[in-house]
């Protein structure tokens, strides 16, 4: 290879080297930016999960009436929510999304407890299969009954329920807004639960 050819080869080689170096830098920069965006999204998701812990626990406890079971189910719900975080669209209703996960974790917990405690015969298995399809419908009916019963509460009680479960305020925050003692709010919610429990048993809704 003569000197001119060597010179041209070196120039071409430097150009290709520069091209691939620039391409690598752009790719690394893009990957770094993507990593930063993903990290930011995950931090926002963790914050949402943290902010909704108390509401999630309250929902799970209302379905189990067992604090130990509620804590166990809450942890499983958080793990599942984290594994499915890419399916959650930021800005949408996180409370509804996370409670739907909790709903299925509660079902799984109950099924596990049943399996641990009992040996089912084929007839019971068949009945469970036949009733599984009606769970969603029963859930909707119970929700409709609950909404109707809430509408029958005194206006101040409706206000407390709205602030606690729709606005997501803690009991002490409600007490501060209403300018009344925290214990008064706690007692109010105790009475509200009693009234709603009795009402849901009796009230009729359109099927």
Image: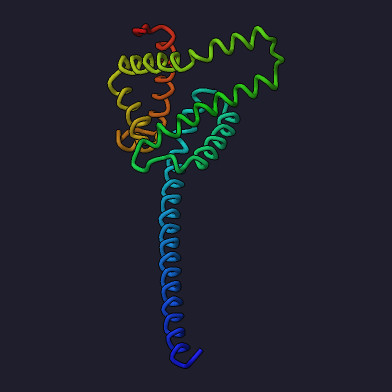
Relative to residue 80, is residue 112 drawn left or right?
Answer: right
Farthest right residue in view: 119
Farthest left residue in view: 155
Pick the residue in front: 163 or 156. 163
User: The C terminus lies in which quarter of the figure?
Assistant: top left
- Where residue 192 appears, as percent x and y from the top left, is 39, 20
- Where residue 144 appears, as percent x and y from the top left, is 36, 15
Farthest bottom residue in view: 3
Relative to residue 157, is residue 130 drawn left or right?
Answer: right
- Where residue 131 appears, as percent x and y from the top left, is 53, 11
Residue at (45% x, 43% y) in the render: 86
Q: Is residue 25 above or below residue 100?
A: below
Pick the residue in front: 85 or 159. 85
Farthest front residue in view: 1
Q: Is residue 120 above or below residue 106?
A: above
- Where residue 59 appears, as percent x and y from the top left, is 47, 28
Residue at (49% x, 24% y) in the render: 62
Question: In terms of image quadrants, where is residue 95?
Answer: top left
Colour pattern of the rendering: rainbow
Residue at (68% x, 20% y) in the render: 115
- How many labels were placed on the picture? 0
Relative to residue 126, is residue 46 drawn left or right?
Answer: left
Q: Is residue 57 above or below residue 32?
A: above
Residue at (40% x, 17% y) in the render: 140
Pick the residue in front: 168 or 79. 79
């Amino acid at each position: 290879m003569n000197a001119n050819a060597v010179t041209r080869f070196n120039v071409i080689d430097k150009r290709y080297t520069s091209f691939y170096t620039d391409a690598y830098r752009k790719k690394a920069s893009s990957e770094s930016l993507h990593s930063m965006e993903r990290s930011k999204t995950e931090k926002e998701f963790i914050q949402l999960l943290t902010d909704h812990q108390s509401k999630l626990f309250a929902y799970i406890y209302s379905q189990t009436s067992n604090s130990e079971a509620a804590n166990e189910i809450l942890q499983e719900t958080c793990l599942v929510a984290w594994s499915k975080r890419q399916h959650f669209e930021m800005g949408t209703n996180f409370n509804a999304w996370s409670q739907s996960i909790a709903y299925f974790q509660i079902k799984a917990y109950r099924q596990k407890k049943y399996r641990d405690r009992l040996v089912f015969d084929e007839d019971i298995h068949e009945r469970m299969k036949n009733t599984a399809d009606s769970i969603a419908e029963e859930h909707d009916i119970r929700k409709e009954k609950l909404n109707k019963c809430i509408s029958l509460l005194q206006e101040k009680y409706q206000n407390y329920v709205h602030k606690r479960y729709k606005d997501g305020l803690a009991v002490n925050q409600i007490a501060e807004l209403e300018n009344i003692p925290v214990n008064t709010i706690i007692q109010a919610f105790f009475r509200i639960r009693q009234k709603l429990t009795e009402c849901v048993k009796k009230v009729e809704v359109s099927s």
